[in-house]
Amino acid sequence: MQNDEKVTIGFRQAQQSDIPYLLQLRKDSMGEHLVSAGLNLSDQQHLERISEFLTDSSIILMDKQPIGLIKLGVLADKLHIRQLQISPKYQGKGVGSKVLALVKKKAKELKLPLTLNVLLANPVISLYLRHGFIVIGQNELEYQMRCD
């Protein structure tokens, strides 16, 4: 599973029954980045974020096993990646690139720019830059990025 070509992924709609998995995924994939941004969130705060736009959430699957989450908002003027989380043991294996390629294809089909926000100190920004995203703004916590 070293190069992107061998990574085969699938998706399924997230369900209420996925919430315990999504809580652990969020803590595993985002915990240190949130803490370094000064956001020490309680489980309740994580659960609120997970439940927000749950209908826009898809579980990322590899060999039918959940390995991550993508939460996409289809808005009037853009396709917005609300969240993209990959389980740490699958990071660096081409999964994020595959997911981004598919989302970029969807944005192109919809004729919409693709946007996302990423925490300032999150190293995943290098993945987004490789995929053609540019920084269009920032606040005290995160960059706003766009890919046309």
Image: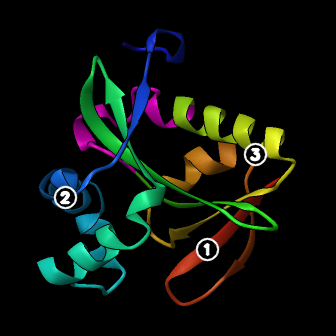
Under circle 1, the secondary element is strand
Q: What is the x, y in percent for residue 49?
A: 33, 75
Residue drawn at point x = 54 percent, y = 77 percent: 142
Image vertical order of residue 96 relative to residue 7, above or below? below
Image vertical order of residue 30 relative to residue 40, above or below? above
What span is colored magenta in the figure? 85-97
Precedes in sequence: disc 3 or disc 1: 3
Under circle 2, the secondary element is helix
Q: What is the x, y in percent for residue 22?
A: 23, 55
**Residue 77 circle label:** none
Q: What is the x, y in percent for residue 54?
A: 38, 62
Q: Is residue 79 left or right of residue 68?
A: right
Residue drawn at point x = 54 percent, y = 11 percent: 5
| Three-letter code for the amino acid on which mark 3 is drawn | Ala
- Asked if residue 87 is among those painted magenta in the image, a careful observer would answer yes
User: Where is the N terminus found, in terms of image quarters?
Assistant: top left
Which residue, as the protein is rendered here, is positioned at the far top? 6
Residue on which the image places disc 3: 107
Q: How many marks?
A: 3
| Three-letter code for the amino acid on which mark 1 is drawn | Tyr
Residue drawn at point x = 61 percent, y = 74 percent: 143
Label 3 near label 2: C-beta < 8 Å?
no
Residue on which the image places disc 2: 19
- Which quadrant holds residue 113? bottom right
**Distance from the alpha carbon under mark 3 to that under mark 1:** 20 Å
| Three-letter code for the amino acid on which mark 2 is drawn | Ile
